[in-house]
Amino acid sequence: MTKTIGLICGSLRKDSYNRIIAKSFTDLDDSHQFHWIEINDLPLYNEDLEISGIPETVTSFKSAVQDVDGIIIVSPEYNSGIPGVLKNALDWASRPRDSSVLSRKPVGLIGATPGGLGTAFAQMQIRQILEAMQVHVLPFQKVLISQVHKKIDSDQKVLTDEQTKRYLQQYLHQFIHWIDHTPALD
């Protein structure tokens, strides 16, 4: 059965390495639908905004999250941690707590960096945040793409490394299979 997968990039840069990696899913798989869930226009989370009226950008973001079968977050690591803009988006998605659009949603994590450690520290933090929000995070699978600048064509904005492409295809297959076997999202 065709799944609709939301793609969230933890970087705001138009041609970020992580956006290129996320875009590669649309090139590697045509049997599922992929929808970008943008986070760049979200205001900083502030409970006063919830009280006075949720901004339209937040409402649209939450609807996009709710309308997909699962989400793959592809994020860089900034100073050994989660990018602030991604943390802000997760905070908005978690509110209000009793009706969070991410609660029990299947989520996969991927990260790419020019460095040698991948995005291990950021992914640990993201996983911790998502688990606190009662999100179903794909277990046991970590995609830590190091030396990403050597695996893409920066001019064409595409992933060129065949081994990484195969790994991402395998990850996507596992993620889709896992969505099918994740407890009901009631």
Image: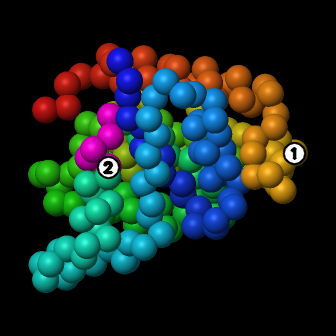
Judge whether residue 66 is colored magenta: yes
The foreground one among 50 and 30 is: 30
Residue 177: where, in percent of width, then height? 42, 17
Q: Secondary structure at mark 2?
A: helix
- Looking at the magenta stretch, what is its main secondary structure? loop
Residue beneath disc 1: 150
Residue situated furthest right in the rendering: 150
Q: Which residue is mark 2?
A: 65
Give the image quarter of residue 77: bottom right
In the rendered structure, which amino acid carries the disc numbered 1? Answer: Lys
Quick one: quadrant of the C terminus? top left
Q: Would you say residue 84 is visible in this rendering?
A: yes
Coordinates of residue 86 in the picture (x, y in percent): 47, 61
Q: Which residues are magenta?
A: 65-69
Quadrant holding the N terminus: top left
Callout 1 secondary element: helix
Give the x, y percent position of residue 135. Answer: 31, 40
